[in-house]
Image (cartoon, grey):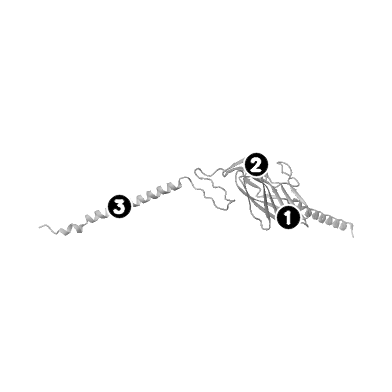
Amino acid sequence: MSSSRMRGRAATVTALAGSAVLLAAVPAFAHVTVTPATAQKGAYSTVAFKVPNEEDSASTVKVEVNLPTDHPIASVSIQPVPGWTAQVTTTKLATPMKTDDGTVDQAVSKITWSGGKIAPGQFQQFPVSLGPLPSDADSLSFKALQTYDNGDIVRWIEVPQPGQPEPQNPAPTLQLTAATPAAGAGTAAAAPAADTGKPVVARAAGNSSDGTARALGIVGIVVGAIGVGFGVFAGRRRSSPGDAGTSGPAA
């Protein structure tokens, strides 16, 4: 075999080996994330913790997500995930929060999902409704632990820092954006209905009284028009030529 052909075959083998290494490294880039990645400050939002399985021969059997205690969230609701059981852990707050529903002295600090399985090559999403989100923070990091049935535990607990490379095991982080301007004046803001599933209707102030006044005005106009028409019709009957001729010619 010529030396040039041997060099070509060696290059091909090297390239294929490099591709195999690259493909083997791809799963390492998959990690626990929160989607969507952004939400509005002071609002309610439904997010999902996306958990991929990174192992080749083991299944994920437990997922723990820790909610930040430095910015506690008053309302947390969990959407059921078939095959999984969710357990909620609450923590007593050093400083109670004041909400529209009263004072809250406890907040959810951890959610643990167990009982299901995420097989190799698969992922699972765990939806959660949160709110109101803090107005004095630019992001929320949710430290997570992923447990496999072979005993391995992956700790997604490294908080990403602005301007720094992404850490090896980043914690799922929700970026908080500035609140949008409030609705137009005179309109009450609708409360979030994610927790109850019941729609909330916002009504403009004074709608009922304004509608009644308009209805009465329309009725008055209609009645007046009928009266005017009746008067004109009666006047015409009294002055018709046929009525004048019934008295006969003068003697």
Q: Earlier in the sequence, mark 3 or mark 1?
A: 1
At x 65%, y 52%, the residue is: 127
In the rendered structure, the answer to whether residue 214 lies left or right of residue 106 reads left
Front residue of 121/77: it is 77
Q: Which residue is mark 1?
A: 61
Question: Which amino acid, mark 2?
Answer: Leu
Residue 194: give its label.
none
15 sits left or right of 197 in the view: right
Amino acid at circle 1: Val
Q: Amino acid at mark 3?
A: Gly
**Residue in view at x 71 percent, y 54 percent:** 114
| Marked residue nearer the N-terminal end (3 or 2) | 2
Q: Is residue 142 above or below residue 23?
A: above
Q: Percent x, y for residue 53?
A: 74, 54
CB atoms of marks 2 and 1 within 8 Å: no
Q: Is residue 95 above or below residue 251?
A: above
What is the C-alpha distance between the residues marked 2 and 1? 30 Å
Mark 3, residue position = 227
Q: How many C-alpha atoms fall within 10 Å of the one at disc 3: few (<14), some, or many (≥20)?
A: few
The residue that disc 2 covers is 93
